[in-house]
Amino acid sequence: MQVSVENTSALERRMTIGVPAERIETEVNKRLQQTARRAKIPGFRPGKVPMSVIRQRYEDAARQEALSDLIQATFYEAVVEQKLNPAGAPAVEPKVFEKGKDLEYVATFEVFPEFQVSGFDGIAVERQQAEVTAADVDNMLEILRKQNTRFENVERDALNGDQLNIDFVGKVDGEVFAGGSAKGTQLVLGSGRMIPGFEDGLVGAKAGEERVLNLTFPAEYQNLELAGKAAEFTVTVNSISEPKLPELNDDFFALFGIKEGGLEGFRAEVGKNMERELRQAIKSKVKNQVMDGLLAVNPIEVPKALIGNEVNRLRVQAVQQFGGNIKPDQLPAELFEEQAKRRVVLGLIVAEVVKHFELKPNEDRVRELIQEMASAYQEPEQVVAWYYKNDQQLNEVRSVVLEEQVVDTVLQKAKVTDKQVSYEEAVKPAEAPQAA
């Protein structure tokens, strides 16, 4: 077999492969002999058909099959011989494809980039430090109470924060417009759910009252047909309910699975959850900075084939997440290309860090992470056991731990500064999260 390789770009290779005619004929004859043993042809007993008849009937098909298999086999042999690492399937172009002659074809493909990770000392990371205070727990208790607010009917004028049950009809230029009418809608005044002026216009209304609101849709309104237009809404207030926050009692604690310990027990459980959230938030922000830094100090070119594969994966994820009667390939590739490229580049860089430093998942850290995740459940022991009985889930945790070890490896050489912040600031998502 003869092989020659041409570098047509930084990552693209054009490989010409020649396969001797003798090897082709050997493969063709092998397939014809297999066919002869099972061929059923009128006038001949099975296995007794003359080879001349077999060749006459089946040689073309056997040759096509042999050539297809030989191209796959010889391509693999060639890349191993040339020590190449293809990043995708090759595009094959036959040059000589005739009976009795050597097979010659050209395979064009991309290879994985060869690089060494470096520049860790040029990565700057700000690591936030925070603690959960008693005031933070108090604030969280109020948030939980508000999330479980119930509304009770009242006989008074509506105030901001009240929930109104309303019917309304909206018109533009005297005509009812699509989506502008509803009956029995629950609306909390001050929630900002409706266009500017709608909720303010209902403050002070009474149950049974009808109000006409003359408003203007915002210029940047999502429905371009209505953006900037004047509208008239006729609103009937059916009922008014005021918010009632639940008491911090056993009934409230039971909503969160806390049946013992009273207020102190509930505060302790909330505090533990907040501590867990705080650790994860700080860890996530540090990881994002490390990944951004690795990208910045290790610019590499990546195969288009890998980006294309990742785009397709993101398309499928988008369809699964948002549903709808749409096929993944109907979503424009441009929507996902930047994210796909980032993920591919980071994947290659992280893999190279793992390889260079010979990292393996630390099984103690794997168990610690599983136990921490399990602690959020009522029966953590069962959750831990479930992970260790499911290889796929366990390997996903190992991958997370391995990424954490990559981050730790980079932090050993990066420029790390610690910054004391409040709990609220620490758990607040970064403005532009860049998770790998």
Image (tube, helix red, strand yellow):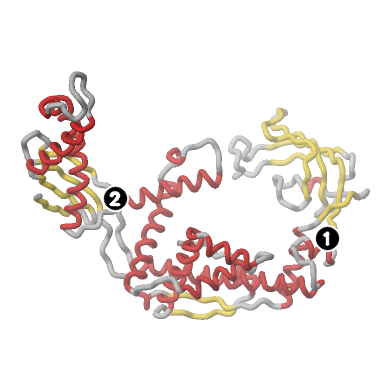
Residue 21 figure quarter: top left
Left-right relation of 73 to 202: left
Is residue 384 visible in the rendered structure shown here? yes
The residue positioned 63% from the left and 40% from the top of the image is: 228
Residue at numbered disc 2: 88
- Displayed quadrant of residue 281: bottom right
Image point (37%, 57%), residue name: 344
- Locate residue 254, reporting x and y percent: 79, 63
Disc 1: which residue? 245
Amino acid carrying label 2: it is Gly
Give the quarter of the figure containing the C terminus: bottom left
* Image position of 305 (left or right of 387): left
How far is the residue under mark 2 from the one under mark 1?
59 Å
The disc, 2 or 1, on the residue closer to the chain's N-terminal end is 2
Q: Is residue 61 above or below residue 90?
A: above
Compared to residue 82, the image places residue 426 above or below, namely below
Percent x, y of residue 418: 52, 80
Q: Nearer the viewer, residue 417 or 111?
A: 111
